Amino acid sequence: MPAPFSPWRLSVAPMMDWTDRHCRYLHRLITRHALLYTEMVTTGALLHGDQPRHLDYNAEEHPVALQLGGSEPADLAACAKLAERWGYDEVNLNCGCPSERVQKGAFGACLMSEPQLVADCVKAMRDATRLPVTVKHRIGVDKIERYDFVRDFVGTVAAAGCEVFIVHARNAWLQGLSPKENREIPPLRYEVVAQLKREFPQLTIAVNGGIKTPDEIEAHLAAVDGVMIGREAYHEPWSMAQWDSRFFGATDPAHSREQVEAAWLDYLDRFHTAGRSWPHAMRHALGLWNGTPGARRWRQVWSDHRLKALPPREVAAQATAARLSGAALAA
Ligand SMILES: Cc1cc2nc3c(=O)[nH]c(=O)nc-3n(C[C@H](O)[C@H](O)[C@H](O)COP(=O)(O)O)c2cc1C
């Protein structure tokens, strides 16, 4: 039976320093169906660095996509092979990152000005792997706001066999803005992404940028095939709790926050038992109780440096007590 939903219907964005394997493990406890992206890994880091450190992940994370940064077709092909060998479900090429470091490496958003090079990269990757090869990009660079710029980019890359495009619906301004400002200042123009879908109905087009609520997601899904969420999923992880029932037809009950916290504690416990520290994983979960009374106290306990050598269950007991007393005070 064909899968009822596109794998790209709803996904959590690649985010450097944020969507590491621990973060993805947490997100998977909250949504069983959304596609999860890794942080961007450069071809140089993969080909000359510690491959297990960059590529290992937890089996529970599937479906999980590896995002690559690079612009050398042969290197990207070699990395796509590695992605397949490691069992990833997709390889994605970053054509949207505006950081200076990335521009020096001549990849990321500046690749949008070189559609034929991106097409060559995609072709080399497709020849090297059976995995889907997808591209994440912007709607333009610098002051280029003409629709035909992004249309020609997508058309050229699609001709090389790419069937899935994830479009951050704002330009990347390569001069004068930090990466953070480049996620906030260039205006969002969702209509450009919807137009791409109308122009290329055979392609899978997903929209990204500034999308937060399930109602917003639903509205976008009327125009495009998928929605990718970044910062909202990270800062407010519980916002993903509705996704499976609302967007993937799941009928089994969603987990409660308590159940997710209990499963997450089991995960942290494994670190502690193995003699490894847990706070670098826990940082991704600090928003778990956001929006409920006592959440701030819970977060404060987990962030307390003096508790970082304790077993996570002891910290959890203190955090829960603080949360419940905060909730009682608020009642
Ligand atoms: C901390 C951080 C790191 C990011 N790192 C990457 C990255 O490695 N690769 C990428 O394609 N986009 C990266 N992005 C951009 C996001 O994938 C996404 O396109 C952007 O945040 C807009 O979506 P949002 O408004 O839902 O957050 C990053 C964003 C943030 C906040």
Image (tube, grey):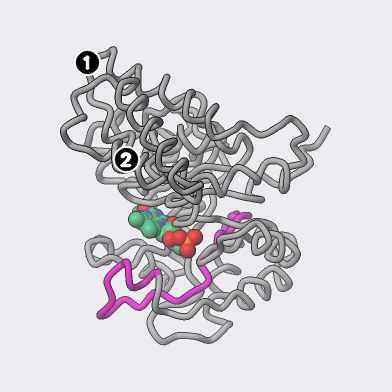
* Up-down relation of residue 140 to residue 35 (above or below): below
At x 71% / y 60%, what residue is drawn? 218
The segment highlighted magenta reads 160-183
Does 172 sit left or right of 300 as displayed? right
Inspect this view and state whether residue 93 appears.
Answer: yes
Q: Which mark is residue 259?
A: none
Q: Quadrant of ligand 1?
A: bottom left
The CB of the residue at mark 2 lies under 8 Å from ligand 1? no
* Residue 39 position in % (x across, y down): 37, 46
* Residue 10 position in % (x across, y down): 62, 50
Q: Quadrant of residue 294?
A: top left
Given residues 100 and 32, the one toward you in this image is 32
At x 77% / y 41%, what residue is drawn? 249
Given residues 21 and 331, the one toward you in this image is 331
Given residues 134 and 326, the one toward you in this image is 326
Q: Mark 2 points at which residue?
A: 283
* Residue 315 position in % (x across, y down): 30, 26
* Residue 137 position in % (x across, y down): 48, 64
Secondary structure under the numbered disc 2 in the rendered image: helix
Does 240 sit left or right of 58 as displayed? right
* Up-down relation of residue 233 to residue 217 (above or below): above
- Dot 2, how many residues are within 10 Å of its Cα: few (below 14), some (14-19), or many (20+)? some
Amino acid under label 1?
A: Gly
Tell me, yes or no, whether the two marked residues, 1 and 2, touch with CB atoms within 8 Å.
Answer: no
Q: Is residue 164 magenta?
A: yes
Does 179 sit left or right of 61 as displayed? left
Q: Which of marks 1 and 2 is nearer the N terminus?
A: 1
Q: Name the residue under label 1.
A: 275
